[in-house]
Structure formats: structure tokens, C-alpha cells
């Protein structure tokens, strides 16, 4: 049975393989860095790059990627692709990042240096209002894996790694001769 994640809260719906349900959404946030705070943003980025990589995706399994970009030493752009709808994504984000969540303020360490950021992330309503006020609508959002959730991609990578370990195991040679495994072995030969 083929199921696709429909929202960040875990609901699933069946999807036809020929017309996958759109599960991946994009979010682009464009904000102005407070005067004199550019180096603080760069320091936060350096701490993030050198520290442990526990992210919202690790905690919720929803994020395909995110990135921060400094433009003209004046603006901070954050872009993210995630599974589900905007309100659920931002609410989950708030729960793991702000309340205080297990991320312990990674996002706040960047965002506290931009204009209009509510102190400490603020209440959920303030947090949502900030994100909505600074959202930039994308013109095009392309996904190489349309209709495939981030959790499914990570699972496929784990299955591939496990299958590769079987292929590498000399004791599995006889079992791999079974005709039912022929399609898997054909895919593995790429």
C-alpha cells in the first residue's frame, strides 16, 4: 500500500503513483538584519555549522532542507522545503524550538538579530505573525521527488544501506540467487 504524508501531524492519504499528492511545500522568509548585528548573525551561523546538527527535521521528520543566506550584509533570507501545510509546520517548529524545545533556541540565535523578531520567539501567535509578515511567495517550487515525504526518503536510504550490507555479506550469496530478489538486484546494479 502506498501512503503519502498529508500534514505535519502525521495524517496519511493514499496517492496514485501516476499523480502523487503534493506533500512538499516551500517557505521563504526575508528579513532585515538589525543595524550593527551582522557579525552576531555570522557568529550564530558559525556556531550552528560547528555544533551538533540536531534539527527540526531530526525531531519531526518533515524538513527536506533549510538554508540561511545573508544578502548585501543587510538582509537574512531563510528558505525551507518541508512536508505538510504551513500552519502545522510553523506550529511544530515553535514547539521544538521556542517553548523551550529540544533545539534550545538554534533558530532564535539567528533570528534575534533581525527586525520585528518577537523577544525569545514570543507567543505562538506572535511567532506565527512574524513568519507570515515576512514570508515571500515563491514563483516556482520544483521537487525532484514530487509526492515523496522526507521521512520516506530517509527510510529509502536506510533500506538501501541495509540491502547493500546484505549484498556485501558473502554468507548471503546463496539467498541472493532466489528469483524473487531479481528486481531488487537489478536496481542495486545501477
Image (cartoon, rainbow, N blue to C red):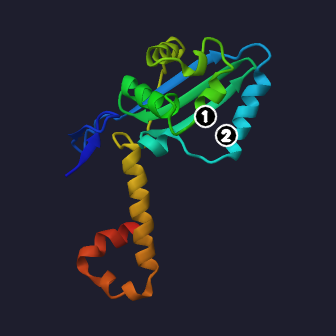
- Local crowd at mark 2 within 10 Å, few (<14), some, or many (≥20)? some
The x, y position of residue 118, in whole percent, is 57, 15
Residue 158 visible at all: yes
Q: How many circles with numbers are drawn on the protein?
A: 2
Report which residue position mark 1 lands on: 106
First-in-chain label (1 vs 2): 2
Q: Quadrant of residue 170?
A: bottom left
Q: Please tell me whether residue 52 is drawn above or below residue 43 in the rendered image.
A: below
Q: Is residue 11 above or below residue 78?
A: below
Using the image as rendered, state which of residue 21 and residue 60 is in the foreground: 60
Where is residue 89 shown, x and y percent of the image?
Answer: 41, 29
Taking the image as shown, residue 44 lies to the left or right of residue 85, namely right
Direction from residue 111 to residue 132 in the image, left or right: left
Image quadrant occupied by the C terminus: bottom left
Q: Residue at x 37, y 86 (%)?
A: 173
Secondary element type, mark 2? helix
Q: Residue at x 71, y 39 (%)?
A: 47
Q: Secondary structure at mark 1?
A: helix
* Residue underneath mark 2: 48
Labelled pair 1, 2 in contact (Cβ < 8 Å): yes
One can see residue 141 in this view: no
From the viewer's perspective, tell me whether residue 149 is left or right of residue 63.
left
Which residue is rendered at x = 77% and y = 13% of the image?
Answer: 35
Amino acid at each position: 500500500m502506498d501512503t503519502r504524508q498529508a500534514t505535519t501531524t502525521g495524517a496519511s492519504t493514499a496517492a496514485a503513483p501516476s499523480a502523487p499528492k503534493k506533500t512538499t511545500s516551500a517557505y521563504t522568509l526575508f528579513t532585515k538584519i538589525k543595524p550593527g548585528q551582522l557579525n552576531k548573525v555570522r557568529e550564530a551561523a558559525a556556531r550552528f555549522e560547528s555544533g551538533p546538527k540536531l534539527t527540526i527535521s531530526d525531531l519531526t521528520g518533515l524538513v527536506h532542507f533549510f538554508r540561511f543566506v545573508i544578502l548585501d550584509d543587510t538582509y537574512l533570507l531563510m528558505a525551507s522545503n518541508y512536508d505538510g501545510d504551513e500552519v502545522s509546520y510553523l506550529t511544530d517548529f515553535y514547539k521544538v524550538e521556542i517553548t523551550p524545545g529540544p533545539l534550545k533556541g538554534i533558530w532564535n540565535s539567528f533570528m534575534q538579530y533581525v527586525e520585528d523578531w518577537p523577544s525569545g520567539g514570543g507567543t505562538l501567535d506572535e511567532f506565527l505573525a512574524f513568519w507570515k509578515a515576512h514570508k515571500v511567495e515563491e514563483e516556482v517550487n520544483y521537487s525532484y521527488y514530487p509526492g515523496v515525504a522526507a521521512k520516506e526518503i530517509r527510510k529509502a536510504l536506510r533500506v538501501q544501506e541495509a540491502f547493500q550490507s546484505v549484498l556485501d555479506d558473502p554468507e548471503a550469496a546463496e539467498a541472493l540467487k532466489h528469483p524473487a530478489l531479481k528486481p531488487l538486484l537489478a536496481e542495486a546494479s545501477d
